[in-house]
Image (cartoon, grey):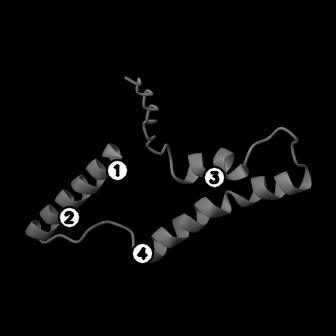
Amino acid sequence: MKPYLLSLAVGILVGVIYALVQVRSPAPPVIALVGLLGILLGEQIPPLVRSWIRPDAVSTSWLHQQVKPHVFGELPQCAKAEAPLPREKA
């Protein structure tokens, strides 16, 4: 989660600097970003169709195997809580 927050903070800082210098941002318009999202989602269609035509008996979920790592990058992992120890009776 830290890299995402750091990236957001740096982006905001650069935006403030651009505003102070009165320079237009070179960021693409929203329509271009929507197109990039479409490309990312479209890349997932061929593996999905392949899995329907020729399913693998041993394969796990297409969502966890193919989509999550590609679209979202490596997501932060939650630390597993340890089970509490049973109390001794007095």
* Helix, strand or loop for disc 4: helix
The residue identified by callout 1 is 4
* Crowd around label 1: few <14 · some 14–19 · many ≥20 (10 Å): few
* Crowd around label 2: few <14 · some 14–19 · many ≥20 (10 Å): some
Query: For residue 65, what is the image quadrant?
Result: top right
The residue identified by callout 3 is 67
Sequence-wise first label, 2 or 3: 2
Judge left or right: residue 60 versus residue 31: right
Q: Find the distance from the CA under tag 2 to the CA under tag 1.
A: 16 Å
Sequence-wise first label, 4 or 2: 2
Q: Please, what is the three-letter code of the amino acid marked with disc 2?
A: Gly
Q: Find the distance from the CA under tag 3 to the CA under tag 4.
A: 23 Å
Sequence-wise first label, 3 or 4: 4
Residue projecting furthest to the left: 20
Q: Please, what is the three-letter code of the amino acid marked with disc 1?
A: Tyr
- Which label is found at residue 30? 4
The residue identified by callout 2 is 15
Q: Position of residue 75 (x, y in %)?
A: 47, 45
Sequence-wise first label, 1 or 3: 1
Q: Please, what is the three-letter code of the amino acid marked with disc 3?
A: Val
Q: Position of residue 35 (x, y in %)?
A: 54, 70
Residue projecting furthest to the right: 54
Residue drawn at the location 44% of the way across and 41% of the way down: 78
Q: Position of residue 32 (x, y in %)?
A: 47, 71
Q: Find the distance from the CA under tag 1 to the CA under tag 3.
A: 19 Å
